[in-house]
Amino acid sequence: MYSVKLNNNRDFPVLGVGTLFATKEGEAEQLVKDAIDIGYRHFDTAMVYRNEKEVGAGIKAKISEGVVKREDIFLTTKLWCTYHRREKVVEACKTSLSNLGLEYIDLYLIHSPSAFKEGDDFWPKDSDGKLMIEYVDYVETWKGMEECVKLGLTKSIGISNFNSQQIDRLLKAATIKPAANQIECHPYLNQAKLIAFCKEKGIIITAYSPLGSPNAIAKETTQAPLQDPKLQELAKKYNKTVAQIILRYLIQHGTVPIPKSSNKKRLQENFDIFDFEISKEDKNAIDALNKNIRICLFTGTEEDKNYPFGIEY
Ligand code: A2P
């Protein structure tokens, strides 16, 4: 598996597997085992996905079988919004580690700059059904993240869904620089400006919803990138599928995509992207498909001072 270097010199495999919505019993564990057999070494989960236990079980099963060693695997998980107070971060990280059944995390991310009311409910609502935002400065949260590194709970730390202004502010206060920013990125939201900004700061972009989350988007619109005529034309030209064109494009675009699939055939399909290269001209044509369509809006957090999507990038 090809890797890029994080700013702390650790290897970050350029293609991973996402696990959001892999919540049916046994689904995430099977997905991870299938993916390891195919050759994937990079997995992405989060406390809020409620599948850390299964993701960890899949990894441990393949370690027990002797297929991989722990150090061959790159595992990302994320701090949920109800744990943003500095004092709560280490506790949350330890809970994730206990769920995973692993000794360390490779990359621990702040899932979102917004904080919610603390408690057992991941999506706390008031009596009117309104999401209960509770402001915490993400710089405070970051101090807790740095503590997780110092305690050896995670090798690297990073952020997710942060905009350029938030990153700038965080960098001024950080003693450990964020290694990655995980953001929604696909041909209809290609994030060119935020990618360039992060590159300059030495922060790698992980691309979530790289295929445009076709099942989620279908509810709102029929404009899924997988149905895009130009991408279909390129798929024919390169004798690849549209998904393969998108994933290859995202890697050439400088990001690390993490497509989710619970289907072994599609996991294999998404992995078979290292035997071709998209020409500069065709890459430019894909760049031109950008429509700034965002799927993952963090609905209910728009009024938060830390809402990240209110500025251009
Ligand atoms: P499935 O799990 O049944 O394969 P994203 O990562 O952008 O959120 O997209 C994930 C969605 O895309 C899942 O619903 C997944 O369904 C589907 N998917 C994953 N890989 C492919 C592919 N190669 N072709 C079509 N759909 C795919």
Image: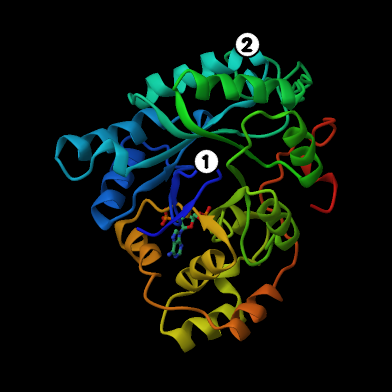
Left or right placement of residue 85 versus residue 21 in this view: right
First in sequence: mark 1 vs mark 2: 1
The label on residue 87 is 2
At horizontal 43% and vertical 51% (from top left) the residue drawn is: 16
Please say if 112 is above or below 251: above
Left or right placement of residue 149 versus residue 228 in this view: left
Left or right placement of residue 200 versus residue 265 in this view: right
The CB of the residue at mark 2 lies under 8 Å from ligand 1: no
Q: Is residue 129 visible?
A: yes
Separation (CA) of disc 1 from disc 2? 25 Å
The CB of the residue at mark 1 lies under 8 Å from ligand 1: no
| Tag in front: 1 or 2 | 1
- Label 2 residue SS: helix
At horizontal 52% and vertical 64% (from top left) the residue drawn is: 251
The quadrant holding residue 29 is top left
Q: Which residue is mark 1?
A: 8
Q: Nearer the viewer, residue 23 or 178?
A: 178
Residue 104 percent coordinates (x, y): 39, 27
Residue 145 percent coordinates (x, y): 59, 24
Q: Residues within 10 Å of mark 1 (few under 14, many from 20)?
A: some
